[in-house]
Amino acid sequence: MEYFYSVQGEGLYTGKAAFFIRLAGCNVGCHWCDVKESWDKNKHPLFEISQLTKEAKNSGTHIVIITGGEPTMYPLEKLTRALKKESLDVHLETSGSYTINGKFDWICVSPKKRKPPLKESLLKADELKVVVYNKDDLAWAEKNAVEVNEKCKLFLQPEWSKSALATGWITEYVKSHPKWRISLQTHKYLNVR
């Protein structure tokens, strides 16, 4: 769909400079999705892997984040191999609903109720980031947290339109369940992509 240079706004790498490659196409269909324009892959141009790799390398950062849409709908081996050949750290942001393919340095699984993650995807997660729209999502978070490996970092992220309301009770939840951390969409506070 697009590529751009910015800062990571979510999860463990918040605040780090990163080059984003956003792949179009998604059939998960979250009603609160902030990039619904990514859903239809046919509305976006195709880019050569060599072009994406060159742009990523020239950005000056060492972190490349492949996101979507849902990027694991596609074979990612060639793209990740080309990025790794340039000594770039390759991160993935996925719902985990498809098999994870390619070589990654960091995998963030953000499970969605409409299309639940595969157990194998949860086991590969370095980071579990659950978007919290209402209090029922806390039970969803806990259900997925028992499926990840013991080193996986756990994040609860208030859905942007609810963040002013939800942050208080999410804070209380984290205080009583300290295995979790709060992730805010800091890129939106900073008004950057």
Image (spheres, grey):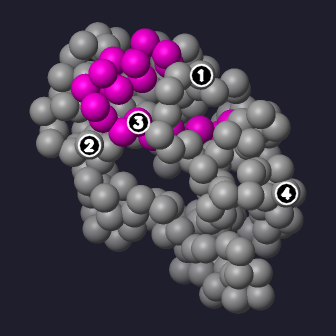
Badge 4 or badge 1: first in the primary sequence: 1
Query: Magenta segment, which residues?
Result: 76-96
Residue 159 position, x and y percent, is: 59, 63
Residue 146's disc is 4
Considering only order in the chain, which callout, 3 or 2, is on the residue closer to the N terminus? 2
Can the viewer see residue 188?
no
Dot 4: element:
loop
Label 2 and label 1: CA atoms lie apart by: 21 Å
Residue beneath disc 2: 62
Looking at the image, do the residues carrying marks 4 and 1 touch, with CB atoms under 8 Å apart?
A: no
- Between 82 and 174, the one lying in front of the other is 82
Q: Position of residue 51 (x, y in %)?
A: 22, 17
Which residue does the image show at 53% across and 22% down from the upper left?
102
Q: Are marks 1 and 3 in contact (CB under 8 Å)?
A: no
| Residue highlighted by disc 3 | 90
Q: Tell me how far mark 2 sits from mark 3, CA to CA.
A: 8 Å
- Identify residue type, mark 1: Asn
